[in-house]
Image (cartoon, rainbow, N blue to C red):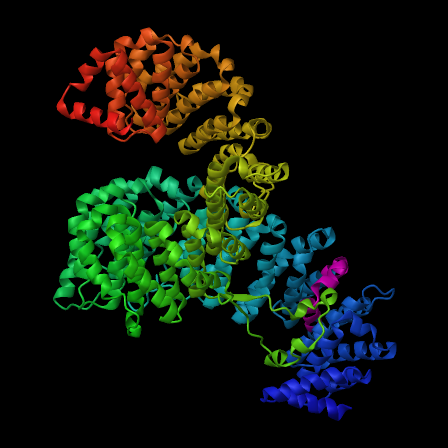
Amino acid sequence: MEAAILDIISGILGMDTERIRQSTAKMMKAYENPDSLLVLTQIVMSDRAVQERHVAAVLLKRRISKLRHWQLVPAEHQSAIKTNMLQVLIAVKEKTVKGTVAQIIGSLVRHEAEKEHSWLEEILKFIYERCSSPDPTESERGSSIFTTLMDAAPDQFSNHMDTIFPLFAGVLVTAEANGNMATPTVFNVLTGTCYLLPFVSGHSGAEQIVVKAVPLILKALGAFAEKGDSQEFMGAFNIIDAMGEYVPHLLTGNVKLILEFCLIIASNQQLEDSIRVQVITFVGSLMRLKKKVIMKQKLLEPTLAVMFEVMCQDSLDDDDDYFSSESSNSPSTAATQTLDLMALHMSPEKFIPPLLQLLEPALQSPQPVLRRSSFICMGVIAEGCSEAIGNKYLEVMLNIVKAGIFDSVMLVRVAAFFALGQFSEYLQPTICKYAPQILPVLFDYLSQLVMELKIGTPEPKHMDRMFYALETFCENLGDDIIPHLPTLMERLFGVLEPQNSHRMREMGLTAIAAVSTAAKEHLVPYFPRIMSVLQGCLVKECPKEMQSLRIQAIDTLAALCREVGRDNIIPLADDTMNFCLMMLEDGPDDPEVRRSIYNLMSSLSSVVKESMATVFPKFIDRIMESVISSEDVLPNVSENPEDDLILDTTDVEIDLDQTDDEDDQDCYQVENDYVFEKEEAILALREFAAHTGAAFAPYLQSAFENVYKMIDHPQGDVRKACIDAICGFITALHKLEDAAGLKRACEIAIPKFAHMLRTDDEVGVVLHLLDELGDVFKDVQLQAINNQEHAELIFGCIRDVFTNKMACQFNEESGGGDEEDSEESENDEMLFENAANLFPLFGLALQPELFSLYFGRLYQFYVQRLAKAKERDIPEHRAYIYGALADSFKALKGCSATYFDALCPIFITGSKDSDAKSRQNSYYALGELVIHSEEKSFESYPVILQALSEAIVRESNPPALDNICGAVARLIVTNPDSVPLAQVLPVLLNHLPLKEDVIENDMIQKAFRVLYLKARPSIVAHLEQILVITIEAIYKKQMPDDETTESAVALIKEIRANYPEQFNQVSNANPEVFNYVQTLFIYWK
């Protein structure tokens, strides 16, 4: 039989696919002979070629990995196979064979686990004896077996933690006593223990051993670092990484020791870069996991010092583009990424001052690398510390950056542009007020670039950083960009000249797309010239070097479709759509091209709307295919190609109850271009649902189902796109009045969203979901939450964000009992803020009585956060808390009265806050509390009116003044008899019309209506003023909706009918007013 099986193995190893198939079939037949497994065992043990032995081991593994197959093996054969496999594991040197044999043993351990005399105990005894041997060769062999088995079947050893971990500690102690901790035995034991760490939680004895062993682990890692073998060090260091990933609570008592070790390694330029990169990367993880301990033990400043030192060790090489996506993973790059993580997870109040102490002397240094690193630092912290920089440091930092833009060294200038781009991206809208200072600098650079290009000067490197700064700044300017458009567009058209490189023109088109976001229809004068440039790029076929330019041209046209106005795009719509269809049908099979086409199609849908019905059938299947495609996730290629040649599973019976997890290839590599295609396809479906109404209705169900399949995608941006799309589909179903479809969609989506809020570890995804859920509740209201269970799920998530229990919050005890006093990072606070703002919108999806129960359980949290924000003098936090409480009363309705006595004093105190936004929200809250509490508020009118009266005298902030007026209007609407109109009304009218927060015009008009109906004598003397205020608000389009406008016009008509003299006095003030009023009457009949 041995000859027959060797022939089968030879066939499997051959190159002929048909022979491989036939050999596989023969092996399936051979398995029917009980002796086949013994023969395979003998071949594995033989001295035949490695490939043959490996294939034999794989064939053996494939058969006996299934319990039902193992149970059919005679007992004497079972005993022989177990004994022989253990001997092979001891003797064999080849990794391929050894790894497969270890997997066989793992399977057998699993099969034998339930027996009275478990084979596992024999194996552990076998390992202990060898690892404890004084003979280095024997201990290395035992530790190697230990590692191999732990890798193959760690779960099977998890019940023996209390005996395995003393072995682990004993090896370390012995190595220290022998004076050499960088031995193969130590390496193997560290590596093997890594595989057990995911299972160690709850095994208190093992946990204590790990904690106590940390100093020895670090000593061993130091020895491996000195030894200089980077692969060995990185393999050993995995135990520290694994502790951070699986049992971070075991790090707490040793954070100082671990961090100091990492900083020493990171600073040592004599070590290999890969060693330093690994420890620097772990420092970033430690900052996320143990920030409270790090702050408590004063470890932040030394960490910052080392990270900055490492950043400054990067050489100034003109050929090295530090910012390119392909930049090497050097220590300086790793330090920059760690600094970014520190900014995201540390309190800005603690983080920024020590960093600035490092940057100030470096910015004045004659060494360019120090200046460049300083600008890079300023740029990378912009996201994590945006609020603090915007409030305290922006002007100073901008002046420093402007100086850096004129530095004599090019790469320092590039770093300054990078910082400016980061500021422009993350410090909105605060940075926009500095446009007069920043834009001239950017324009001068752009002008100089255009002049150099015209005279044939080679294009400078790193111009993408300058364009990045220009784009991010311009796209957020809004109307403030209008005065600068002539100069800016002249420069950009110079960049787009055909003689310039494709890359330069591509950056010019990207800038125009960014400008269109701010300028909108004000870009129309330049539209024909832009289109003439784009048309030269929008072609089916182009040279390879022009492909990126074509893609950017498509994206720029998509931006223009969204921004420059429907009338300007409609004439181009048919041709543009035909181009899209042609590119999908006959264009290149390129995910980036498809991504850009989907972007253009979705932008067109916002223009042509329901007319998309005629083209949906031509491409909707292709876009759905991109959504569910698996091309963006590729299984890792096996290190052992023989594994993939054996046993076509179509010919094998699959046992669902006894599947072999070891064979699963569950590690994936994500391919960016396909990810971007998938993300854009999902977002396109959302836009189709939003803009095309009934035209997209036939595709809503399949779109929902396909997008839902992708919601657990490993890429956060894809998960966010799925959230966007599913929320958009729910809103579309609501608008289509498809009650049954809406109910089904919400029954699926709401529990899933609650699960994601709780388990997703990316802060950005959770923040996004909190925002989008709020929009769904606001749009769909009572139909969004179908039952009490769903309400509890969402409420539980909001509550647990407040108490730091979500996966993305990395809550970790500091061990010092000061958790309540710890300062949050801006990321933490954004989570609190988004959850706080979601809560009142969640209330809109519930009946007031039910929401009141939830509000009663949670509002004290707001009060506590408010006290904390006052104590630390953080005005932004006070503002959002007042605002979220105020927004809750709309959902509480009459139940607001229950909380009147507790909250009214808080808002009166808030009306005296030093921060204008906090005062504004407090005034608004007082009005909302009164109007929804009704009778409960009547006895407090004097106190509230006194507070508002004092406030209006001292208030100078226009939006805050508008909200005082809104609050007074609410008091009038609720109970005009309790308002001393003779004193209040003149003051109110003198502060109207509203200046900025014009949405309050709704309540102002309701107050005018109430006064006209219920207290007319008190307002007769003020009718002319009321008319002027009302007409001006309508003329300036400051009414929040048509209903308010219609009510206002009706009031004007009634005044005209009943008080013609006062009406004519206003109407005849000048011909323009007269004509406008007459037009109003005609339009609003």
Determine the image quadrant of residue 648: bottom right
**Magenta stretch mostly in which secondary structure?**
helix
To which quarter of the image does residue 922 belong?
Answer: top left
Magenta-highlighted residues: 144-165
Residue at the location (57% across, 63% down)?
237
How many callouts does the rendering have? Answer: 0
Choose between 811 and 482: the one closer to the eye.
482
Q: 54 above or below 613?
A: below
Q: Is residue 488 above or below residue 942?
A: below
- Which residue occupies the foreground of this view, 623 or 656? 623
- Toward the left, the furthest residue is 455
Location of residue 172 in the rendering, given as x and y in whole percent from the top left corner: 67, 63
> Would residue 1050 be seen by someone viewing this image from the given angle?
yes
In the rendered structure, the answer to whether residue 554 lies left or right of residue 836 reads left
Q: Does the magenta stretch include residue 525?
A: no
- Please check the rendered image and state whether residue 150 is part of the magenta-colored stretch, yes or no: yes
Quarter of the figure with residue 70: bottom right
Asked whether the viewer can see residue 327, the reply is no
Front in this rendered view, residue 374 or 22: 22
Q: Which of 111 and 102 is in front in this view?
A: 111
Image quadrant containing the N terminus: bottom right
Q: Residue at x 61, y 89 (%)?
A: 14
